[in-house]
Image (cartoon, grey):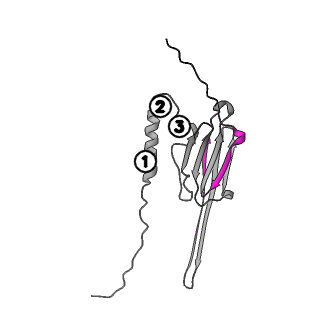
Amino acid sequence: MADAPVEVKRTVPARTPDVFRSFRNEMDRLFDRFSSGFGLPTFRRLFDIEPAWDYRSSFTFPSPAVDVTEDDNAYKITAELPGLEQKDINVSVLGDTLTIKGEKSYEKEEKEKDRHVSERAYGSFQRSFMLPESVNREQIAADLAKGVLTITLPKTAQAQKQQKIEVKAA
């Protein structure tokens, strides 16, 4: 048997499909079909004005995961932004649109006696949401804690009033 060295080539593993994004899209479609039968706008479409298709290149970071909730006094938008700091995030309102923008950068450099490794990645994201008329735009607040951005959209006083309607027997 010969003791010849064999060249080992390293390959990049195949990109695995994003199972969770696919599952979320299917659930969104299911709820969209259900609510459209009643002629109501979907909860997702009420806030989210992003296109249904999702274009990404290898140089952008994915849009953050976002939850939208509502209680008697306010709507809350919670976005997961791990690794971002306050200076990297911009939240703005223009007309009826709330926009979250962020920019992330990563740099790593290792120098040793016989090797030098330098890695860099830069990217940005943007999410936009249509604001309902019941939001008090003057009191919108945004807080960042432990990589989670929470935007509080207080309801107007008129939207918080519950009107009791008497039910009459026919």
User: Is disc 1 surrounded by few (<14), some (14 to 19) or many (20+) residues within 10 Å?
Assistant: few
Real-space CA distance between mark 1 and mark 2, rounded to the nearest whole angstrom: 20 Å
Upstream in the sequence, badge 1 or badge 2?
A: 1
Label of residue 36 in the image: 2
As drawn, 88 above or below 7: above
Residue at figure coordinates x 51%, y 45% from the top left: 53
Tell me the amino acid under the disc marked 1: Phe
Upstream in the sequence, badge 1 or badge 3?
A: 1
- Compared across the picture, whether 169 is left or right of 89 comes to left
**Residue 26 sits in quarter:** top left
Label of residue 23 in the image: 1
- Compared across the picture, whether 50 is left or right of 4 comes to right
Real-space CA distance between mark 1 and mark 3, rounded to the nearest whole angstrom: 18 Å
Upstream in the sequence, badge 2 or badge 3?
A: 2
Question: Disc 2 on helix, strand or loop?
Answer: helix
Tell me the amino acid under the disc marked 2: Ser
Q: Is residue 133 magenta?
A: yes
Give the x, y percent position of residue 143: 66, 51
- Compared across the picture, whether 72 is left or right of 27 comes to right
As drawn, 151 above or below 39: below
CB-based contact (under 8 Å), mark 1 and mark 2: no
Q: Which is more foreground, mark 2 or mark 3? A: 3
Question: Disc 1 on helix, strand or loop?
Answer: helix
The residue where tag 3 is placed is: 43
Residue at figure coordinates x 68%, y 33% from the top left: 157
As drawn, 6 above or below 12: below
Give the x, y percent position of residue 45: 54, 38
User: Is disc 3 surrounded by few (<14), some (14 to 19) or many (20+) residues within 10 Å?
Assistant: some
Residue at figure coordinates x 70%, y 39% from the top left: 137
Real-space CA distance between mark 2 and mark 3, rounded to the nearest whole angstrom: 11 Å
